[in-house]
Amino acid sequence: QVQLVESGGGLVQPGGSLRLSCAASGSIFTTIWMGWYRQAPGKQRELVAGITVGGSTNIADSVRGRFTISRDGAKNTVYLQMNSLKPEDTAVYYCRQTINYADYWGQGTQVSVSS
């Protein structure tokens, strides 16, 4: 069994920064892909950023240049560094990892951007 635990959300003022972390634990043999999604109230869940085991990344146009995704393979952890946050970035952020050819999701962490 694999579990994902997210951390790092919170309330921040516009222009501020946050760093999200998502650590996987359990019986991990191979990790193929790690990424972050977000879901704002009344909207569909959308992909924010993803990174493959080889380090290739894809970033949503709405956050490109402000958000950076990275990973620590030894710790089975993926990070999302969020800079220059805007009110429209407010959402619940979910981590997803493809481990042992199955998809696992984190519990979600709230990010609120407001003055």
Image: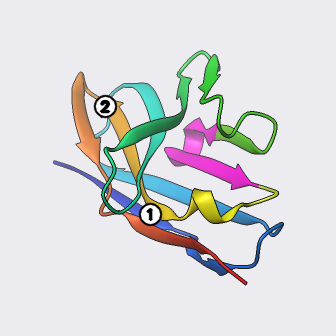
Q: Please, what is the three-letter code of the amino acid marked with disc 2? A: Ile
Magenta stretch, main secondary structure, is strand
In the rendered image, residue 75, in percent from the top left (x then y), is placed at: 55, 48
Q: Which quarter of the rendering shows the C terminus?
A: bottom right
Q: Is residue 71 left or right of residue 46?
A: right
Q: Is residue 57 left or right of residue 83?
A: left
- Label 2: which residue? 99
Can residue 79 be found in the magenta stretch? yes
- Stretch in magenta: 71-82
The answer to whether any part of residue 27 appears in the image is no
Give the residue at x 62% y 41%.
72
Can residue 53 be found in the magenta stretch? no
Q: Please, what is the three-letter code of the amino acid marked with disc 1? A: Glu
The answer to whether any part of residue 57 appears in the image is yes
Disc 1 and disc 2 in contact, CB within 8 angstroms: no
| Nearest to N terminus: mark 1 or mark 2 | 1
In the rendered image, residue 84, in percent from the top left (x then y), is placed at: 82, 57
In the rendered image, residue 46, in percent from the top left (x then y), is placed at: 41, 39
Of 41 and 68, the residue lying toward us: 41
Give the residue at x 25% y 26%.
100
- Label 1: which residue? 6
Q: Residues within 10 Å of mark 1 (few under 14, many from 20)?
A: many
Give the secondary structure at mark 2.
Answer: strand
